[in-house]
Amino acid sequence: MDVAQVIDLGRESLWVAVMVATPLLGVALGVGLIIGIFQAATSIQEMTLSFIPKLGVMVLALIAFGSWQIAVMVDFFQRIFERIPTLFM
């Protein structure tokens, strides 16, 4: 296993992590921004007002994107396991 393979494997791993995390983090960011603007406009500073809707929307996003995220991770791990015999040659 040479340095180029290690770097390629690390790059691919980070890319898969970003792809899998982006939908949930993007939804959380968008909802948090909307709730923050609402709280600033109405001067309501309740902590649960920002947490509960964000949690609910993230659950919906996980339902919507979950199968795609699992498919991406399964494909990645299948490629990793296919590479194992060639790593130490």
Image (cartoon, rainbow, N blue to C red):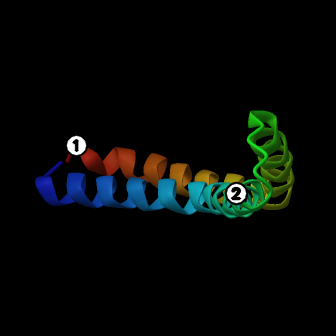
Q: Position of residue 2 (x, y in %)?
A: 13, 52
Does 33 sit left or right of 42 as displayed?
A: left
Image point (75%, 51%), residue name: 43
- Total count of labels: 2
Image point (75%, 62%), residue name: 41
Mark 1 belongs to which amino acid? Phe
Image point (84%, 60%), residue name: 64
Q: Position of residue 89 (x, y in %)?
A: 20, 48
Q: Position of residue 69 (x, y in %)?
A: 68, 56
Image point (53%, 49%), residue name: 77
Res 72 → quadrant? bottom right
Looking at the rendered structure, the secondary structure element under dot 2 is: helix
As rendered, which of 25 and 85 lies closer to the eye?
25
Name the residue furthest front: 43
Distance CA(mark 1)–CA(mark 2): 58 Å
* Residue on which disc 1 sits: 88
Name the residue furthest left: 3
Q: Crowding near pointer 2: few (<14 within 10 Å), some, many (20+)? A: few
Q: Crowding near pointer 1: few (<14 within 10 Å), some, many (20+)? A: few
Res 7 → quadrant? bottom left
* Residue on which disc 2 sits: 40
Looking at the rendered structure, the secondary structure element under dot 1 is: loop
As rendered, which of 86 and 31 lies closer to the eye?
31
> Of marks 1 and 2, which one's residue comes earlier in the chain?
2
Mark 2 belongs to which amino acid? Ala
Does 4 sit left or right of 63 as displayed?
A: left
Res 9 → quadrant? bottom left
Does 26 sit left or right of 2 as displayed?
A: right
